[in-house]
């Protein structure tokens, strides 16, 4: 290690304040009292986003310029507040002393994220004040801190521009996917979904009964489902026994059905390659003879935004069977459906390849960012 810097505990160069949540009775959404932040929900790239909750009872306070660390689910992300706020138990405030350039501390906290572990090791749940204070960062003299910040600011500005452009390209691909779908399906008669598909509800056996779980019945949940890149699913993360299936409202749909998540979130889709059951967060659609299952998948994908808008509820949105069955869908003759599916498969394969390239670019950008931080805080940044 260079003679020009030393490794210091964060607690020796910063003040760390653990958050404490007021009782919910004191919360409001009308701007009365002090802005209140419970966790990382309002985090942005750096500066804390606008509040959605205020409190008339103030517990722990962070001031403008303080850094906020998420201390539970997830642990480690940081942001900076620009005003006086009240912080809840999901946050800790970190206030730099005069030996630290605030921007230098910002980059140091980003660098520390890779090593932060909470109470249960690598898969962490939380981190406390003492653990934050024990984190170590290299302390250079202020002139060197300023030099490091200047280099990182310039490098990160360029990386952020590339990241923003790449994310825009990914969004453009998705817009093209939807617009292409609508174009090829714009000239057909419309019918209500229930007239061309049978809708089946899902269910969950009692999770405390061991005999209901770990059998041969595939059991899908929204967590198993993804976007267009995971269109077909053969195996699920959890399975049921025949007893579990019989003692629940779960039902099996035949292979080549389409399973749709109808809450938490609405709109995930999968084609099952084997007979499969699913939980109450999903509904299965068994296509009739006039409907190709792959065509049905594309129809539902095209209508993802509408499906979400049809969801109702206050605690969380759920798409009811009633609203789903009345969904208007365009159904051409089966031979045309198969032709359209073949075309969409070819076009979407190209889109997925381009999307994968952009995703790798984002991964590489993040790796480069981490590499720059590593060099900076090991005294090797030139």
Image: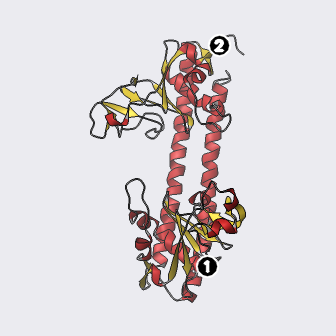
In the picture, the quarter occupied by the N terminus is top right
Where residue 205 appears, as percent x and y from the top left, is 60, 62
Residue 165 horizontal side relative to residue 47, left or right: right
Q: Is residue 256 above or below residue 118?
A: below
Query: What residue do we see at 40% from left, 71% from top?
Result: 323
Residue 237 horizontal side relative to residue 41, left or right: right
Front residue of this view, candidates 177 and 280:
280
Query: What residue do we see at 61% from left, 42% from top?
Result: 365
Q: Earlier in the sequence, mark 1 or mark 2?
A: 2
Residue 67 horizontal side relative to residue 124, left or right: left
Q: Is residue 214 above or below residue 335?
A: above
Q: Secondary structure at mark 2?
A: strand
Give the crowd class for mark 1: few <14, some 14-19, many >=20 residues within 10 Å.
Answer: some
Where residue 293 appears, as percent x and y from the top left, is 58, 78
Where residue 123 appears, as percent x and y from the top left, is 66, 39
Q: Which mark is residue 351?
A: none
Q: Which residue is mark 2?
A: 5
In the picture, the quarter occupied by the C terminus is top right
Front residue of this view, candidates 176 and 90:
90
Query: What residue do we see at 46% from left, 80% from top?
Result: 194
Q: Which residue is mark 1?
A: 342
Q: Looking at the image, can residue 234 be seen?
A: no
Front residue of this view, candidates 25 and 179:
25
Q: Secondary structure at mark 1?
A: helix
Q: Looking at the image, can residue 69 be seen?
A: yes
Where residue 245 appears, as percent x and y from the top left, is 64, 68
Give the crowd class for mark 2: few <14, some 14-19, many >=20 residues within 10 Å.
Answer: some
When asked about the image quadrant of residue 370, the answer is top right
Front residue of this view, candidates 7 and 173:
7
Distance between the alpha carbons at the discs numbered 1 and 2: 63 Å
């Amino acid at each position: 290690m260079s003679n020009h810097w030393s490794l210091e505990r964060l607690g020796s160069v910063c003040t760390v304040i653990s958050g404490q949540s007021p009782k919910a009775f004191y919360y409001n959404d009308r701007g009365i009292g002090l802005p209140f932040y419970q966790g990382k929900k309002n985090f942005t790239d750096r500066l804390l986003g606008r509040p959605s909750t205020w409190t008339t009872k103030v517990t722990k306070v962070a001031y403008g310029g303080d850094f906020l660390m998420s201390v539970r689910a997830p642990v480690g992300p940081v942001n900076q507040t620009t005003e006086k706020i009240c912080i809840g138990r999901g946050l800790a405030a970190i206030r730099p002393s005069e030996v630290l350039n605030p921007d230098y501390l910002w980059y140091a906290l980003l660098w520390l994220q890779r090593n932060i572990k909470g109470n249960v090791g690598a898969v962490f749940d939380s981190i406390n004040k003492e653990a934050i204070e024990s984190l170590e960062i290299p302390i250079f003299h202020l002139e060197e801190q300023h030099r490091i910040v200047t280099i990182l600011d310039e490098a990160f500005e360029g990386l952020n521009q590339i990241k923003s452009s790449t994310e825009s390209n990914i969004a453009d691909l998705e817009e093209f996917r939807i617009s292409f779908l609508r174009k090829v399906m714009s000239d057909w008669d419309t019918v209500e979904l229930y007239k061309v598909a049978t809708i089946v509800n899902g269910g969950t056996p009692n999770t405390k009964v061991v005999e209901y779980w770990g059998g041969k019945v595939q059991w899908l949940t929204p967590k198993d489902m993804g976007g267009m890149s995971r269109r077909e699913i053969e195996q699920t993360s959890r399975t049921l026994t025949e007893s579990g299936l019989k003692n629940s409202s779960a039902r099996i749909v035949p292979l080549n059905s389409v399973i749709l998540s109808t809450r938490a979130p609405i709109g995930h889709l999968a084609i099952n390659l084997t007979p499969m059951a699913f939980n109450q967060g999903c509904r299965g659609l068994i296509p009739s003879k006039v409907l190709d299952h792959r065509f049905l998948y594309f129809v539902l994908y095209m209508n993802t935004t509408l499906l979400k808008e049809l969801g109702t509820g206050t605690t969380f949105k759920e798409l009811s069977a009633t609203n789903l069955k009345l969904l208007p869908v365009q159904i051409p003759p089966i031979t045309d459906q198969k032709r359209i599916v073949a075309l969409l498969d070819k076009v979407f394969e190209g889109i997925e390849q381009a999307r994968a390239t952009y995703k790798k670019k984002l991964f590489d950008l993040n790796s480069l960012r981490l590499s720059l931080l590593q060099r900076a805080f090991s005294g090797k940044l030139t």
